[in-house]
Image (spheres, rainbow, N blue to C red):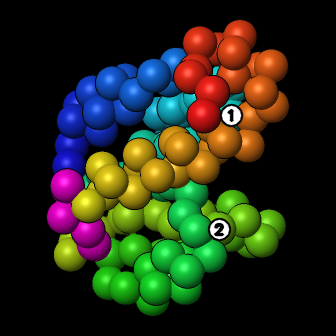
Amino acid sequence: MTYEEFNAFCQSLPAATYVVQWGGAQVWKVCGKVFAIGGWEVDAPSFTFKVSDVSYEIFKDMPGLRPAPYFASRGMKWIQHFAQPGLPDSELQDYIRLSYQMVAQGVPKARRIECGLTIS
């Protein structure tokens, strides 16, 4: 996945917003909370996203994936896709979508309504 494809996908998610921060990282948020990050690797595109506890255990030792720098060192379950083989683009998009959903669910109901998210 290229950064252009990553940004187009993230932009398609409801109430997703984009900001460049942390030294040029492409950061995507839902209701002000980070759900995906593109960047931090010079040689190849890298993508960081939140995962479930089970997915974290599976992904942390897979080739091309690793516990996300900074996040994982603070006990958060975030994975960074940083090299091949990693995940196929369609699976990477699925996991970014799941990250978005997990983060959105953690936003208080009133804030989700302010952001225009459907409450389920």
Mark closer to the chain start, 2 or 1: 1
Magenta stretch, main secondary structure, is loop
- Residue for badge 1: 33
Q: Is residue 49 above or below residue 38?
A: below
Q: Amino acid under label 2?
A: Lys
* Magenta segment boundaries in residue numbering: 86-90
Q: Which mark is residue 77?
A: 2
Element marked by disc 1: strand
Q: Do residues under tags 2 and 1 come within 8 Å of each other at their CB atoms?
A: no
Q: Amino acid under label 1?
A: Lys
Element marked by disc 2: loop
| Local crowd size for mark 2, using a 10 Å CA cut-off: few (<14), some (14–19), many (≥20) | many
Q: Is residue 50 left or right of residue 2?
A: right
Q: Quadrant of residue 13?
A: top left
Query: x, y percentage for residue 78?
Result: 59, 63
Residue placed most toward the observer, 87 or 23: 87
Q: Is residue 67 above or below residue 2?
A: below
Residue placed most toward the observer, 96 or 61: 96
Write the residue at 68% across / 34% down: 33
Write the residue at 50% across / 76% down: 55
Q: Is residue 48 visible?
A: yes
Q: Is residue 26 left or right of residue 94?
A: right
Q: Quadrant of residue 23?
A: top right
